[in-house]
Amino acid sequence: MGLESNSQNMISWISKSSGSEAVAGLGTLIFVGLFAVSPIAFILVNSFNIASPGHPFRGGVQGWSDAFGDGKSTKRHRLQFLLSIRSFVGVAIAFAVSWLLVRIRIPGRAVIEFFLWVAFFCPADLPRLDSVAGSQLWRAQPMAHEAAVY
């Protein structure tokens, strides 16, 4: 009964909305879609450009054959695919932990939840940036890009 009433409410809401709201919603959807998809489209189109930078477009598949023709590149692509599988493993572990936190009374639940929130709001590069900044504060000689200025 609940599902039917929800679908009927949704249909009645759509029929009550004015045409200008529908046009505005469709326009927003198209704008956001173009904004999100256009960089991917530019990259895909330019992946077939074999001309040097600053020259007119010249089509070809030389870049793709270079990327997949070399044995080292193929090995790198396989390794990258293997490493991408870890995201699915991470999602499965996160789902299991979240289910346990919600359904079962675990000792230290508040501490685990606190650290999950900290991990969510802290940037991933925070430890690395801290160590890089700390090491650069105490160095005695300028780095290579700074030496050219002096």
Image (cartoon, rainbow, N blue to C red):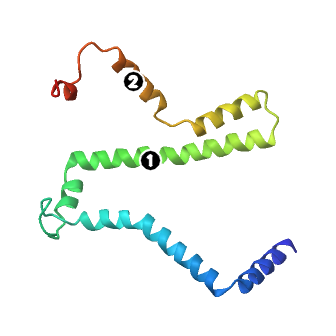
Residue to which mark 2 is pinned: 133
In the figure, residue 60 lies in which quadrant?
bottom left
Asked if 122 appears above or below 68 in the picture, the reply is above
In the figure, residue 102 lies in which quadrant?
top right
Residue to which mark 1 is pinned: 84
Given contact means CB atoms under 8 Å apart, are the residues at marks 1 and 2 in contact?
Answer: no
Callout 1 secondary element: helix
Neighbour tally class for label 1: few under 14, some 14-19, many 20 plus, Cα within 10 Å: few
> How many callouts does the rendering have?
2
Given the current orientation, which residue lies at the most extreme right position? 1
Asked if 10 appears above or below 88 in the picture, the reply is below
Asked if 79 appears above or below 4 in the picture, the reply is above
Residue at the image point whose x is 44% and y is 25% from the top: 130
Residue at the image point whose x is 81% and y is 38% from the top: 104
* Residue 40 position within the rendered picture, expressed as x and y whole percent measured from the top left: 37, 63
Callout 2 secondary element: helix
* Residue 37 position within the rendered picture, expressed as x and y whole percent measured from the top left: 42, 67
In the figure, is residue 100 to the left or right of 55? right
Which quadrant would the C terminus be assigned to in this image? top left
* Residue 46 position within the rendered picture, expressed as x and y whole percent measured from the top left: 25, 64
Front position in the image: 127 or 144 = 144
Q: Which of the two marks, 1 or 2, is nearer to us in this view?
A: 2
In the figure, is residue 68 to the left or right of 121? left
Amino acid type of the residue that numbered disc 1 sits on in the rendered structure? Ser
Disc nearer the start of the sequence (1/2): 1
Asked if 14 appears above or below 141 in the picture, the reply is below
Disc sitting over residue 62 in the figure:
none
Residue at the image point whose x is 19% and y is 65% from the top: 49
In the figure, residue 10 lies in which quadrant?
bottom right
Residue at the image point whose x is 44% and y is 47% from the top: 84
Front position in the image: 88 or 59 = 59
Amino acid type of the residue that numbered disc 2 sits on in the rendered structure? Ala
